[in-house]
Amino acid sequence: MSRFRLSAPRRVPGINTASLPDMIFTLLFFFMIVTHMRTVPVMTQLHLPTAQELQKLEEQSLLVYVIAGKDTTIQLNTRFIRPEEMPVHLATLKNNVVEENRGKMIAVLRIDKDLPMGLVNDIKHHLRQAGILTIHYSAEKSRSK
C-alpha cells in the first residue's frame, strides 16, 4: 500500500468581486470631478472685456445665459433671438423653473466689449421686466504685467 493518498482534483477559487462596486464608484466620482461640462455653447463671435477679480458661479440650473456678439445678434441660452423677442422667451424660461426658484434666477451676460451700450441697456431692461434681477457679467481675466 502506498503512503500517498489520491485526492479529488483541486478547483480554482472564484474571483472575489466584493470591491468591484467601490472601484466603479471611485472611477465615476473621479470623472465627474475632472470633467468640465459646458451647458450653453457660444455660437457667436465675441471679445469679452477684462477684469481684475473674477468669481465662479456654482449653481448652474438657475442660470440664464444672454450672449451678445459683435454683430448685435443675441443668443438666449441655445437660441438666437431678436431683442424684441426677449420678453416672450424669458417668460418661457421662467415658467420652466419651479415656482419657488423663479426669484433666484440669475442672468449671465456675455457681451462683446464693443457692443453698443443701448443694446446692453435694452437687454437689462427686458431682464428686469421678467423679474430676473441678479445679473452677472462674464469677463476675461486681465493679464497683469
Image (tube, rainbow, N blue to C red):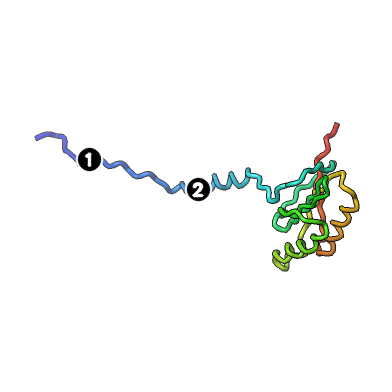
Image position of 9 with respect to 40: above or below: above
Image position of 93 with respect to 67: above or below: below
- The quadrant of the picture occupied by the N terminus is top left
Q: For the point 66% across and 45% down, which residue is it?
A: 36
Which of 117 and 108 lies nearest the eye of the viewer?
117
Q: How many marks?
A: 2
- The quadrant of the picture occupied by the C terminus is top right
Q: Residues within 10 Å of mark 1 (few under 14, many from 20)?
A: few
In contact (CB < 8 Å): disc 2 and disc 1: no
Indicate the position of residue 128 as horizontal and vertical percent values. Answer: 84, 62
Residue at far bottom of view: 99
Indicate the position of residue 127 as horizontal and vertical percent values. Answer: 82, 60
Give the side of residue 123 with respect to residue 15, left or right.
right
CA distance for labels 2 and 1: 34 Å
**According to the image, label 1 marks what residue?**
9
- In what element is the residue under mark 1? loop
Q: For the point 83% across and 49% down, which residue is it?
A: 72
Which of 38 and 5 lies nearest the eye of the viewer?
38
Q: For the point 70% across and 54% down, which residue is it?
A: 60
Residue at far top of view: 145
Looking at marks 2 and 1 on the same chain, the residue that comes earlier in the sequence is marked by 1
Indicate the position of residue 76 as horizontal and vertical percent values. Answer: 76, 55
Looking at the rendered structure, the kind of residue marked 2 is: Asp
Residue 113 is marked as: none
Give the side of residue 113 with respect to residue 62, left or right.
right
Indicate the position of residue 22 as horizontal and vertical percent values. Answer: 50, 48
Q: Residues within 10 Å of mark 2 (few under 14, many from 20)?
A: few
Q: For the point 70% across and 66% down, which residue is it?
A: 98
- In what element is the residue under mark 2? helix
**According to the image, label 2 marks what residue?**
22
Looking at the rendered structure, the kind of residue marked 1 is: Pro
